[in-house]
Image: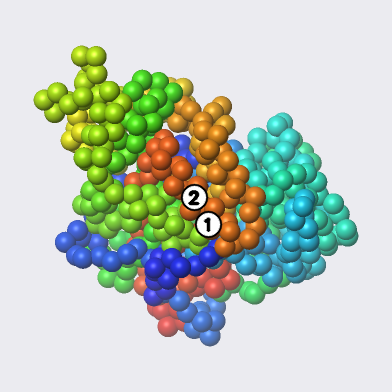
Amino acid sequence: MIRISPSLFRGARRFAFLTSLALVLSACSLLGGSEEQGELPLADYVAAESQDLADGGTLTLGAEYLPANFNPLHTDGSNSDAPRILAPTMGSAVRVLADGSWEVDKDYAKSVSIVDRKPLVIEVELEPKAVWEGGTPIRSKDMVAFVKAMKDSRFSGDAHPAMSDIDSVDVTSDLKYQVKFKRVNADWPAVIYPALPAAITTSQDTFNSGFQTQAIPSNGPFKVALISTETNTIRLERNPRWWGTKPPLSEIVWRFAEPDVLAQAFELGELDMAPLRHLDKKSLPSGAEVRVAASSYWSQITLNGGRGPLEDAKVRQAVALAVDRKAFAEDQKVELGRAGPPLDTVVTMPGQVGHHAVGTKRDLEAARNLLDQAGWKDADGKAVKDKKQLELVLPIPEKQEPAKRRAELITKQLAEIGITVKTEVVAADTFYEKRVIPLDFDLVTFTRRGSAFNVSQSRLWFTPRDSPQNFTGKESKETAKAFSAVLTQLDPDKRSEASETLETIVANQASVIPLVVIPAAWVVRDGVVNFGPTQFEQLDWTKVAWHKDSQEK
């Protein structure tokens, strides 16, 4: 097993808003809660070398939701499972590793280099053999058209925020171009390679509405051969124009159904992987194993500092000090049978390169003192000011068990410092539209997602105030300055120091309280190698295979 521990990277130098809470695992046992579990690994799969891989075979995978759009750069596609489903068909000049660092993917680029720092200029030399699915070579003109489209509001694009800092793409030759930035942005590796051919990004209609029933052209080892909404099936087959290492698998099949149906299909041998919900270690069918890793998802509480008592930083800080992250982790263990690590940072996650834990601890006495300083006095265990009790409104979406359980813990923990939390159950399909986006709450809890290049993204959670992803009801010049200090620092050591300072400032602002990393758990058929859940690492689909000795394939 490859089990990469976060502790291996803690000394090293060197997250897209999700609108669907359904992506979070529901209440069930992953492994049985009685067992003592260590730290979650950053990746969990059985590693095997090329000589041990079977040539051929089908890997059948289960997922809940068939995407409504198969363009991962479209707003509808990016907030679905499309990026994960199409991963075997997509590649880039940069490959993300287990700890969130990266390396040049030689299948796509001969080189990626910084040629100037003021202004920031990145030069990319393309792999001349690389082609799109139809046989058209991947060339510099694709990057020019890609950037132009992603910066054009007429395209319903959802590019990485660093894209907005690109000033120009200057073509040196068909195989070489330079990406010039208006300002230094350390997240630049996320935006220096074209994800789509020019034929798509020069047509607004094609980009916006051309991929509801078909996938974007492949530039990876597999291509999409079938999308069936009647059978809820997607089939991928080897890309005959793939120029790299031949993938061992002949095809990959995705099947979509409700969790109970997926679990039953796995038990009947019709799936080789399913998200783990209702199976536990004791009830696993023979020939199956559980693979669990830390995911890139994390739970949190957002505080609305734009109204009521939470306008006062001391009250927000008191709330943060009253939160017991370990209790959320323990509850997650009861709910899921396995818990991710408690989290007190918002830009990086445990095990990720450059991560520094803030070291936030629960301190009820300090929390009560802060409330007292803010004018909220203790009256028979209640925080009272001007004869009014301190009450905070926390809406939760109906039938979302993880959110409900977090709300119950929040209510219990804040009651210990005299704060009453009033929970309001609202319709799940209007939760964001009617309560979160218009900031109609005091507290709200949902999940965020981290990424290897997350500073640009997480900045939008805090600044500017009118950012569509800022639900804190405020902005802070100090916080904005701290984000800029990280983004504009290209030296890994100095950037790590700036990141540590940023996390401390964000923690003191107490507008977003991170809680705990959410586990990713799959049940996988025995014999499948180089395949399993990962936090950031991109699976190598030229190595995912059945072991040559397996009888399952």
Amino acid type, mark 2 = Thr
**For residue 161, what is the image quadrant?**
top right
Taking the image as drawn, is residue 460 in sight? no
User: Taking 430 as reference, is 387 left or right?
Assistant: left
Q: Residue furthest left?
A: 380
Quarter that holds the N terminus: bottom left
Rendering coords of residue 152 (x, y %): 73, 35
Amino acid type, mark 1 = Glu
Question: Going 66% across and 67% down the picture, which residue do you hit?
Answer: 104
Question: Going 58% across and 41% down the picture, which residue do you hit?
Answer: 481
Q: What element carries label 1?
A: helix
Quarter that holds the C terminus: bottom left
Give the Cα distance between marks 1 and 2.
6 Å
Q: CB under 8 Å between callouts 1 and 2?
A: yes
Q: Residue furthest bottom?
A: 51
Residue ID for mark 1:
497
Q: Residue furthest front?
A: 373
User: Taking 199 as reference, is 451 left or right?
Assistant: left
Q: Residues within 10 Å of mark 2 (few under 14, many from 20)?
A: some
Q: Residue 232 carries which label?
A: none
**For residue 238, what is the image quadrant?**
bottom right
Rendering coords of residue 275 (x, y %): 37, 55
Rendering coords of residue 303 (x, y %): 38, 32
Question: Going 63% across and 74% down the picture, which residue do you hit?
Answer: 246
Rendering coords of residue 503 (x, y %): 46, 48
Q: Is mark 2 on a helix, strand or loop?
A: helix
Q: Nearer the viewer, residue 180 or 238?
A: 180
Residue ID for mark 2:
501
Q: Residues within 10 Å of mark 1 (few under 14, many from 20)?
A: some
Task: Look at the picture and state if 241 lies above or below 78.
Answer: below
Task: Look at the picture and state if 495 lies above or below 393.
Answer: below
Taking the image as drawn, is residue 318 in sight? yes
